[in-house]
Image (spheres, coloured by chain):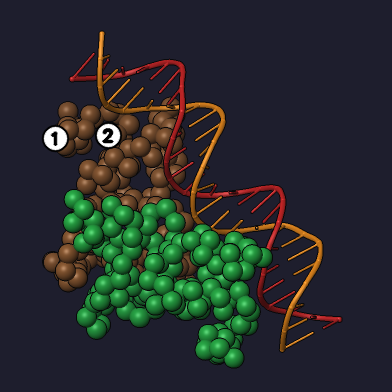
Chain colours: A green, B brown, C orange, D red
Amino acid sequence: MSDTAALLSGRGIRPSPQRILILDFLRGTKEHPSADAVYRALSPGLPTLSRTTVYNTLGLFVREGLALSLGIDGVQSRFDGDTSEHGHFRCRACGGVYDFPVKAGGISPRLPRGFTADLVQLYCIGTCPSCAAAG
Amino acid sequence: MSDTAALLSGRGIRPSPQRILILDFLRGTKEHPSADAVYRALSPGLPTLSRTTVYNTLGLFVREGLALSLGIDGVQSRFDGDTSEHGHFRCRACGGVYDFPVKAGGISPRLPRGFTADLVQLYCIGTCPSCAAAG
DNA sequence: TTAAATGCAAATAATTTGCAGCATA
DNA sequence: TATGCTGCAAATTATTTGCATTTAA
């Protein structure tokens, strides 16, 4: 059994070929793909894969804490298989989304009394080095 | 001329009745409304108002720095007329979006070399006091 | 009188839902 | 076999676009 299959099983998620494929892809890319980008990337290798399954699966992973759903791109959700603490940067010019480190425990805002957060996300929007160089 | 009209004029934006209405509404609510919510709120008082104009106007305000577009609600953009530095909290239970303060200069991540951010947003997702009390 | 702003209708894009068949415990 | 998973097609929701009309500098 693959590592990924074991990871899924360990969380009580049946390790179907589609789920393994999608989770492996998410964990192996830094692209922060949209649901449709995941579909387009994997569909050639598994032609029966459907968008429905991609949406179902990404939603499942997010609920189960195996992936992050990013609202950084106003139009579509983008997904990140790296759930460790880090920030996200979106370049206005190329649309790319990049990770950036935040110091350990760096994102822990003091919320008003009574609010409890289970998820914190830090987004920066601006220009990435390549686009800055390109002018 | 109203304060709002003056504010728009000062930015080189023609202060049409629709723009004044929408900006006044945005600045007078803590609801972080979606584009459609803005439309539904204002349409009764100005029946000729169209969704197109609401979308156009909100987009203009965001580009001109008069409002913030929040990607905190995975499905739709929500808008905030308060552009001062603060964080946003979304309650999973009721869907409400709340402001919370961050200490001055509190959101200034160290980005990798070459990245320049013109906008930083901090999102927390969890449970608000009312929903926590409701169980 | 000219450019900008508005708003209707249609188009597009992202996502969700209903449901039937398949796979697997 | 019973339950969960997949995927097609249709539906829904959010947003954008094309274009004719109106408004105001």
Q: Label 2 vs label 1: CA separation?
A: 13 Å
- Chain containing the residue with disc 2: B
- Which quadrant of the structure image shows residue C11? top right
In the image, residue C5 above or below residue B126? above
- Residue plotted at (56% across, 79% down): A20
Residue at position x 42%, y 35% from top? Answer: B52
Which residue is more in the foreground, D25 or B100? D25
Residue type highlighted by circle 2: Ile
The label shown at residue B10 is: 1
Residue B77 on image: x %, y %: 39, 52
Q: Quadrant of residue C25?
A: bottom right
How many C-alpha atoms fall within 10 Å of the one at disc 2: few (<14), some, or many (≥20)?
many
Do marks 2 and 1 both belong to one polypeptide chain? yes
**Residue behind mark 2:** B20
Crowding at mark 1 (Cα within 10 Å: few <14, some 14-19, many 20+): few
Chain letter of the residue beneath label 1 in the structure image: B
Give coordinates of residue B25: x percent, y percent. 31, 42
Residue at image location 42% in from the left, 53% down from the top: A75
Task: Give amino acid for label 1.
Answer: Gly
Q: Position of residue C6 (x, y in %)?
A: 37, 27
Residue A85 visible: yes
Q: Position of residue B98 (x, y in %)?
A: 33, 62
